[in-house]
Image (spheres, rainbow, N blue to C red):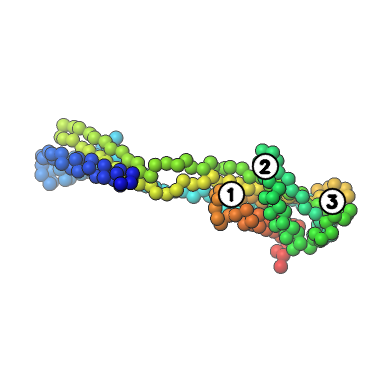
Amino acid sequence: MSKIQGAVLAASALFLAASAAPVLARPGGWNGPGWNGPGWNGPGWGGPGWGSPLDTRLPPNRRFEDSREGRIEASHFVAEGDAAVALGHGPVSVTSQSAQDDFMAGSDRAVYEAAVVDQLVKAGYDTTHADSEGGQVTELRISRDVLVPAEVKRSPVSGSAAMEVGTRGSAYGLAVNVDMTKPRTALVNTRLEARIVDKASGKVLWEGRAEVATRDGDEKWSGHAIASRLSEALFDNFPRPDSPPRG
């Protein structure tokens, strides 16, 4: 016999025991204190029956979605002056890094580098001559932070029972809650930051960042999927956010 079946049988036994308790007659019959009086509309249904400590109803198993999950946010900054005219053409290289406190292995960062290279090619850059002396370099920083820790493993069966004794008799309450849902994995925020720098002068020509919160291990949000979606949001309408969309 499983733990769940045992818990349900135990709950049923307690319920039958409570049902076997003698019921005391209430004065007044159906139209007296029983039906319209303190019975149903008084201390029973409308009174301390459900609103007192005797109330053993368990809250429904509701899972509220985090509004941050799956939502991509992006922002951009373009340098003022003639320096920004150089954006969108010429040779460009891509490098990436990860801080020690949110370290990401080079093999994982390579996925983001490849996704950004695709967007730079679409923008008009030459990525085949990235080692030339002139041109620009795109510096990436990828970080991951835990927004909500993973849920702890819990028992699928829970319940509560209560008993109340008064001058008019005894009352019993019993509730069993069966929750077969799996604990949620951690909600992780992934951020992709980029800045395009002129190699000759070292001046920052463009900056942007994009981030998304996803559940750790979610098949819909693999490393490749996150890198692709963040790169697309990062370079949307490049080089200026208010410019017409690229064809």
Residue at the disc numbered 1 = 213
Image point (15%, 35%), residue name: 168
Identify the mark nearer the N-term, 2 or 1: 2
- Residue 35 location, x and y as percent? 16, 45
SS under mark 2: loop
Residue positioned 54% across, 45% down in the render: 186
Residue 119 in percent (x, y) is at 72, 59
Q: Which residue is mark 2?
A: 103
**Which type of secondary structure does the marked residue at label 3 adopt?**
strand
Disc marking residue 142? none
Give the x, y percent position of residue 127: 80, 59
| Point 51% across, 43% down: residue | 150
Q: CA distance from mark 2 to mark 1?
A: 17 Å
The location of residue 161, given as percent across then percent down, is 28, 37
| Cα distance in 3D space between marks 3 and 2 | 27 Å
Residue type, numbered disc 1 = Ala
Q: Is residue 47 left or right of residue 67?
A: left
Query: Is 240 placed above or below 21 here?
Result: below
Q: Is residue 73 left or right of residue 59?
A: right
Q: Is residue 63 left or right of residue 139?
A: left
Residues at badges 2 and 1 in contact (C-beta under 8 Å)?
A: no
Query: Does the rendering let one see residue 58?
Result: no
Q: Nearer the viewer, residue 162 or 238?
A: 162
Crowdedness near tag 3: few (<14), some (14–19) or many (≥20) residues, C-alpha within 10 Å: many
Quadrant assignment for the C terminus: bottom right
Q: Residue furthest bottom?
A: 247
Front one among 72 and 78: 72
Which residue is under mark 3? Answer: 198
Q: At label 3, which amino acid type do we have?
A: Asp
Give the SS element for disc 1: strand
Residue type, mark 2 in image: Phe
Q: Residue at x 58, y 49 (%)?
A: 213
